[in-house]
Image: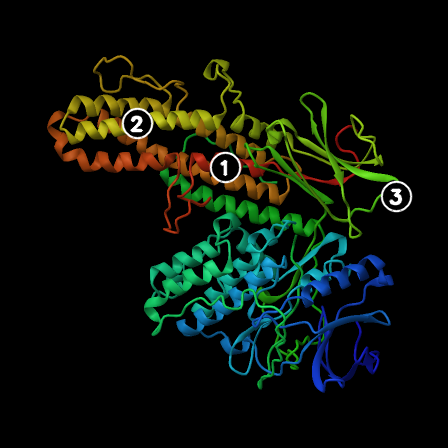
């Protein structure tokens, strides 16, 4: 690390005057720019061993991108350079405070919270439109000018540090646990702007309550809580707020980024609306500067601040098979899975060499004040190791699963007259599918998106992927030399095939049409809902026979039986087409997911995706026990009791309806993959993302 003792008196046109502070990830100096008579802050980045030209190129590329950000709520980068192997960024010297200083563990007034969230959201959305993700939104990185306006600093510092091996040993990443989105904690490579929106939600929770949503004794456990623990209720901490505020935060902090607000401004507007009753004057969400260009801002304030830490994002216990679920088992299983995933993540991180490296010395920001306080566990920056060379994900463009996205990292560029070729592989018929050339950049990264022109469902057809080295201008029928490859685990592949393509029961007579478990569940649900409607109609009309016969139908449709449970000797006790039963179908589906969760070699990220699917399946599965019991009760109701049973039949019928589509329990207008919400349709939707293939070095397909 460059320090005051070995730094030259000048860096470019800047005269170094004093050391403002230093820490594990940057050193900040006060400097003077004589040609325009102003003081500036110079942030010196850690040296890159050997001054790798690839890292130097990347530094300059990223610095130019950051310097183009011109927004009144973003601290601008005036200049950047490299001198005598020293890489530096030049920013305004701000001698004032930060949002962290303002908060100091206290709650802020609702009007002030909305002002800060509104302005910071505007800055975040502006940067996202320029293709830049912050990755480290937190109070330390929000400075306040002399009028109290928030200024977001350190945009892109994390991105700049991604190539520095001192911070990414073995492909590791950095993150701040207290504000880290679940996907960062899981080591997802394709971090996008919704991680910033999550962090903004954490910030809002902190300003509203004076505390973090998650706390623990170690940074690792804080990170695990963001990944696995339910979103805490605002009202349990601060019951004086309107319930709508809690609903807004629940959505902003959703584990699934698809379920979050998709822009920061959308979140800010929702928060302002929910808090409107506690704000004397309405506070709108300003977008006046969203497209601001060429605005030069000089920020000077008066009070000292803490120090932001620029960080980098992060791009076997056997579970018993399911027998029969009751409502009372739901909470136990949910808590159990959270614990299992936390343990799995812990083992994976430790095995990968996770290092909590606390640097000696102090760290400072552009404000000119070094930080002397000891950071809490939840605020410590944690490097999280990554051991793969990329991954393959499946998506949908025209039809389900017709698109695949290859992404690589940390791979060498090919030699002249050679190219990297992307492939999918099917072990079922030993077939290779060439997808095209991978355009690897100087930083070892590449992204290739391929959509099947024949609308083929790729994610159920292929269970392997590879990157091969080929002569330029050739496309062989199969790879010549495989350098990187990966396979879908057999347990995951089997689960996908049976859930989404064709179920293979022990008794082939159960599925003669070779339907998928999702299709079977959907069909059985449709019949159950229809006959629950008919039973309710009968009860409403006071018709005992109609109520009994259709309740019996529902009982048999759910169980896959043809029992005469009311002794009326009627025929057609199960009118469904398949007679598999919703309960057996969902139980078989859940057992497949459990087998996939226990697959040897499965990664934490893959497990997290499986648990998402399982949540939807078990939402419907756990509800069936009471519904079956009530169907049996209504199938035996006496004529004299019908008029008193209408409300109960209505409630029963209303509980059956969400089994398929799910229901919006938290009132945020989104059916999410959380307990109590998504259902059978959620299984279909989220199962697609179970199919993640992780690249390792070498050939794991044909060897």
Mark 3 vs 2, N-terminal side: 3
Q: Which residue is mark 3?
A: 415
Q: Residue at x 28, y 25 (%)?
A: 531
Q: Nearer the viewer, residue 569 or 454?
A: 454
Crowd tier of the residue under label 2, counting other residues whose Cα lies within 10 Å: few below 14, some 14–19, many 20 or above = some
Could you say where residue 349 lies in the image, as x and y percent from the top left?
A: 66, 51
Tag 3's secondary structure?
A: loop
Q: Residue at x 47, y 13 (%)?
A: 509
Mark 1 vs 2, N-terminal side: 2
Q: CA distance from mark 1 to mark 3?
A: 41 Å
Q: Residue at x 61, y 44 (%)?
A: 605
Could you say where residue 144 lies in the image, as x and y percent from the top left?
A: 55, 77
Q: Residue at x 74, y 45 (%)?
A: 389
Q: Are marks 1 and 2 in contact (CB under 8 Å)?
A: no
Q: Nearer the viewer, residue 495 or 377?
A: 495
Could you say where residue 521 lies in the image, as x and y percent from the top left?
A: 43, 27
Q: Furthest-left residue in view?
A: 640
Q: Are marks 1 and 3 in contact (CB under 8 Å)?
A: no
Tag 1's secondary structure?
A: helix
Could you say where residue 571 lies in the image, as x and y percent from the top left?
A: 27, 12
Tag 2's secondary structure?
A: helix
Q: Which residue is mark 2?
A: 530
Q: Image height check: is 557 above or below 106?
A: above
Q: CA distance from mark 3 to mark 2?
A: 64 Å
Q: Are marks 3 and 2 in contact (CB under 8 Å)?
A: no
Crowd tier of the residue under label 3, counting other residues whose Cα lies within 10 Å: few below 14, some 14–19, many 20 or above = few
Rendering quarter of residue 674: top left
Left or right: 410 with respect to 417?
left
- Is residue 217 something that shows in the picture? no
């Amino acid at each position: 690390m460059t320090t005051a003792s070995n730094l030259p008196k000048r860096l470019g046109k800047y005269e170094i005057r004093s050391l403002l502070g230093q820490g594990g990830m940057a050193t900040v100096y006060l400097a003077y720019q004589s040609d325009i008579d102003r003081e500036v802050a110079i942030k010196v980045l850690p040296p890159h061993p050997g001054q790798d030209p690839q890292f130097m190129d990347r530094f300059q590329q990223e610095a130019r991108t950051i310097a183009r950000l011109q927004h009144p709520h973003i601290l601008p980068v005036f200049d950047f350079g490299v001198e005598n192997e020293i890489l530096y960024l030049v920013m305004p010297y701000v001698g004032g405070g930060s949002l962290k200083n303002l908060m100091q563990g206290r709650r802020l007034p609702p009007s002030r919270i909305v002002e800060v969230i509104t302005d910071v959201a505007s800055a975040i959305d502006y940067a996202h439109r320029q293709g830049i993700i912050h990755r480290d939104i937190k109070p330390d990185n929000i400075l306040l000018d002399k009028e109290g306006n928030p200024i977001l600093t350190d945009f892109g510092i994390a991105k700049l540090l991604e190539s520095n091996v001192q911070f990414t040993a073995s492909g590791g990443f950095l993150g701040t646990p207290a504000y880290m989105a679940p996907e960062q904690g899981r080591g997802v490579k394709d971090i996008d702007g919704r991680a910033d929106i999550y962090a903004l939600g954490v910030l809002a929770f902190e300003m509203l309550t004076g505390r973090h949503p998650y706390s623990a004794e170690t940074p690792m456990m804080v990170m695990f809580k963001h990944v696995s623990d339910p979103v805490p209720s605002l009202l349990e901490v601060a019951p004086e707020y309107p319930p709508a505020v809690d609903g807004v935060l629940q959505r902003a902090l959703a584990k699934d980024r698809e379920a979050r607000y998709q822009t920061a401004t959308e979140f800010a507007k929702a928060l302002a609306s929910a808090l409107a009753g506690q704000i004397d004057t309405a506070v709108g969400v300003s977008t006046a500067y969203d497209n601001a260009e060429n605005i030069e801002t000089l920020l000077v304030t008066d009070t000292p601040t803490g120090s932001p830490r620029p960080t980098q994002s992060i791009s076997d216990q056997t579970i018993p098979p399911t027998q029969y679920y009751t409502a009372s088992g739901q909470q136990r299983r949910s808590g159990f899975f959270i614990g299992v995933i936390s343990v799995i993540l812990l083992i994976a991180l430790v095995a990968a060499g996770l290092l909590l490296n606390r640097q000696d010395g102090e760290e400072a920001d552009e404000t000119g004040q070094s930080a002397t306080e000891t950071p809490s566990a939840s605020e410590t920056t944690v490097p999280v190791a990554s051991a793969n060379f990329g991954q393959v994900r499946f998506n949908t463009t025209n039809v389900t699963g017709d698109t695949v996205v290859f992404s690589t990292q940390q791979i060498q560029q090919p030699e002249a007259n050679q190219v990297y070729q992307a492939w999918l592989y099917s072990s079922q018929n030993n077939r290779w599918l060439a997808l095209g050339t991978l355009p690897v950049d100087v930083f070892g990264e590449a992204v290739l998106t391929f959509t099947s022109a024949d609308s083929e469902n790729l994610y159920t057809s292929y269970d392997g992927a590879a990157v091969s080295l080929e002569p330029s201008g050739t496309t062989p029928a199969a790879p010549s030399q495989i350098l990187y490859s990966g396979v879908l685990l057999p347990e995951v592949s089997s689960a996908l095939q049976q859930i989404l393509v064709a179920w293979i029961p022990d008794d082939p007579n159960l599925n003669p049409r070779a339907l998928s478990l999702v299709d079977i569940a959907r069909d059985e649900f449709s019949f159950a809902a229809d006959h629950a409607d008919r039973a309710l109609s009968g009860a409403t009309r006071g018709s005992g026979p109609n109520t009994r016969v259709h309740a019996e139908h529902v009982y048999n449709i759910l169980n896959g039986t043809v029992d005469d449970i009311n002794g009326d000797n009627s025929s057609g006790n199960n009118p469904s087409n398949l007679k598999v039963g919703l309960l057996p179908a969902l139980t078989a589906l859940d057992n497949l997911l459990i087998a996939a969760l226990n697959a040897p070699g499965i990664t934490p990220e893959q497990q997290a995706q499986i648990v998402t699917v399982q949540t939807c399946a078990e939402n419907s599965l756990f509800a069936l026990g009471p519904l079956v019991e009530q169907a049996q009760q209504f199938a035996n109701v006496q004529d004299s009791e019908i008029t008193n049973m209408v409300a109960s039949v209505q409630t029963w019928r209303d509980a059956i309806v969400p089994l398929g589509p799910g229901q919006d329990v938290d009132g945020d207008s989104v059916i999410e993959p959380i307990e109590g919400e998504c259902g059978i349709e959620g299984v279909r939707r989220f199962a697609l993302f179970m199919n993640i293939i992780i690249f390792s070095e070498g050939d794991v397909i044909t060897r």
